[in-house]
Amino acid sequence: MEIEQTVEGKAPRTEPVASPSTAFASLTGEDPRRAHIVKTARAWIGTPYVHQASVKGAGCDCLGLLRGVWRELMGDEPESAPPYSEDWAEASGDEEMYDAFKRHFEEVDTAALAPGDAALFRMRERGPAKHCAIVGERGGAPTLIHSRANMRVTEEPFTNAWRRKLAFGFRL
């Protein structure tokens, strides 16, 4: 299976992704709560990347997107995010993002990720998990809704390249 991916300023490309039946629970028969999480996250698409921000339409980073979706769905955030640099977890190697997610969400096996779940990624092999996304779905194939440096919030295919970086999964 191939999914077309469009990145701002670049021509569309296709990339093979894992079959949606492989380690992915679809929104088929839609769970209304999961569908609402995905719909809420999609409303942030186009928000510019701004480090440490969390304001729909004005700016957010990957954690800011998740924080904003939390506020829209559940109200006040359960704890304040401490100030962090873009390489914040690299120096210590601590799993700070994982620890924070574990305090507030149910951890699930990465093979059981479904739309509406949060995925945590290791951007460097053996590095700490420091990037997050909300899992979505388009046409039966898994997607990631997230913000990355120098990009707006996007929804892109959950490719094999992303799967290799996948470290943890959480049910929101």
Image: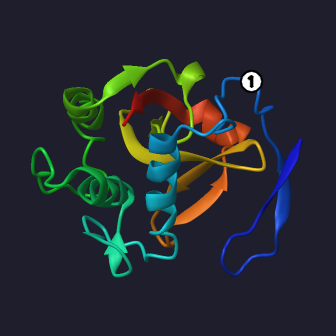
| Residue 31 found in image quarter | top right
| Residue 76 found in image quarter | bottom left
Who is closer to the viewer here, 150 or 4? 4
Work out whether residue 74 can be spotted: yes
Q: Going 44% across and 20% down the picture, which residue do you hit? A: 108
Q: Amino acid at mark 1?
A: Thr
Q: Going 35% across and 74% down the picture, which residue do you hit? A: 56
Query: Is residue 135 found left or right of 96 in the rendered image?
Result: right
- Mark 1: which secondary structure? loop
Q: Going 56% across and 22% down the picture, which residue do you hit? A: 112
Who is closer to the viewer here, 14 or 75? 75
Query: Is residue 119 found left or right of 99 in the rendered image?
Result: right
Who is closer to the viewer here, 74 or 147? 74
Name the spot of residue 172 as percent of width and height, x first: 36, 37
Taking 57 as reference, is 79 above or below it? above
| Residue 48 found in image quarter | bottom left
Name the spot of residue 60 as percent of width and height, x first: 34, 68
Query: Is residue 151 found left or right of 67 in the rendered image?
Result: right
Q: Disc 1 marks which residue?
A: 22
